[in-house]
Amino acid sequence: MLWIKLDNPAVLPTGTGYTCAFSHDSVYLAVGHYTSTYFKIFKRDGDTFTKLPDPAEMPAGPSYSCAFSHDSVYLAVGHYESPYITIYKRDGDTFTKLDNPLELPAGQGYSCAFSHDTTYLAVAHQNSPYFTIYKRDGDTFTKLDDPAVLPPSHARGCAFSHDSAYLVVVWPTSDFIIIYKRDGDTFTKLPDPAEMPTASSYSCAFSHDSVYLVVGHDTSPYITIYKRDGDTFTKLANPSSLPTGEGRGCAFSHDSAYLAVAHENSPFITIYERDGDTFTKLDDPSELPTGLGRGCDFSHDSVYLAVAHENSPFITIYKTVADITFYFNARGDAVWTDPDNIVDNDLQTFGYTGAKKTAQSLTGNSCPGTDLGLIAQVQLRLYGYGDGDDRIDITPVFLGGDGDRHETTPGTAPGWSSYINITNDTNHPDWSLWSDIHDLDCIIDSVGVKATRPIYCAKVEIRVAHSPPPLPAGRSFGFIIG
């Protein structure tokens, strides 16, 4: 599966995106941001996200967190300035502010979360008692008694398990995390996990099956993943590839198959695929968020992933699509030495050249042109090696002419380059037909950056992201609503 960036909404947040949340029906996306009007609500129609008119009453300051209730009726926004939490009720596309709770959070609301049954709303905030739990009765939210054990400092994140039995709260000082178990309206602290997060904790999330809990924090490994067995939470082995900076936001997909982490440092979003208790990093999206990742959320149907971040556009939305790979299997006149080794689908045999600016054309590929659905994105990469400085530039060749020149710098050991996105290159086709893939050729060109040494290539691959074709009439897939 690939995550491809959608076009930006026509109206964007006006400052750093701190948080984002999808409604349970996957129709609405809320984004909290730094500058007035402090948050925006988008409605999804297919892959288009359109800003709705602002509610009549907006939050009083920068919005740090937001959460929809499971029934998609209520939207809570945690923010700077009193009342620190603003709760809306949705009627169609209209969001109307409810009366404030009689007892407000004691300071700016850093995080908020509804229980899956929409009965409870937790708010992590700046001042003692550092987090507050409300119980909903109709449109009234009433503060419950504080748990006997509270965080020792301002809480930065909170999350309910999908079964509404557990509530986790994280904060930036030792021991960084408390896990509560709910019995009616009473929340009782469980014994700490044997292994705690390594530093200040900013975010947390449960998987939809209530089995896994992730905590995003400062210092490596930046995320800590636990597996629940009854009331015991046991730390799993770290993923082999870690986020590149502190985990500011994290979210599981509804099917519990994917975990996203918004973090400091490029690529700003890291996506893992879960296989049992193993979390494996997926390839980065070809288009990354433009700044530090602050928050992320999956749509309930697990199709969309939104990332709130620094720098315009402040919100980046991805869609997951299927992918298939092909390879170039024919060549033009021999320019490189042993060029047949580039088109034989064998990573152990290489074509090569020691001459600067030597262009080898590849004139056919393995795509048969069979319709596999709507083409969303087309990418190329190559398998090769060199001296670590010299380049192999790739230029796609379309029926309408050459595309853009894309630079790759192979390492000193054989390996794949990063994928390059050629979807919108100069002279690109409209990709309405799979024959556009079948007709794709390319040119690989050696570029000596320092003293030119031989540079090697074994394969050039095409990856196509696509949506499945419509089902034949009379056929359907079964599904489960949960």
Image (cartoon, helix red, strand yellow):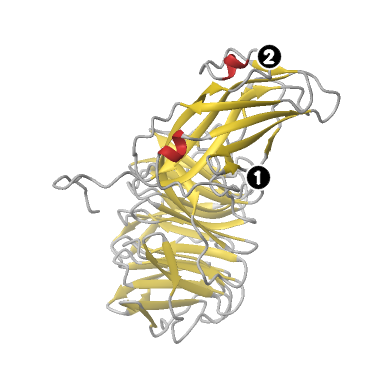
- Relative height, residue 307 to residue 145 (above, below): above
Observer-nearest of 208 and 7:
7
State the separation of the CA atoms marked 1 and 2: 48 Å
Looking at the rendered structure, the number of numbered marks drawn on it comes to 2
Characterize the local packing of mark 2: few (<14), some (14-19) or many (20 or more) Cα atoms within 10 angstroms.
some
Q: Where does the image place residue 299, in percent across and percent down from the top left? A: 39, 56
Would you say residue 192 is visible in this rendering? no
Nearest the eye: 350 or 370: 370
Q: Compared with residue 213, is residue 96 higher up or lower down, i.e. above or below?
A: below
Q: Is residue 480 left or right of residue 318?
A: left
Residue 399 in the image: above or below residue 206: above
Between 153 and 271, the residue placed more toward the observer is: 271
Residue 463 in sight in this render: yes
Q: Which residue is drawn at 47% across and 79% down?
A: 104
**Residue, far left:** 474
**Residue position for label 2:** 337
From the viewer's perspective, is the residue at label 1 or at label 2 nearer? 2
Q: Is residue 90 positioned above or below 184 on the image?
A: below
Residue 131 x %, y %: 49, 67
Q: Name the residue under label 1.
A: 219
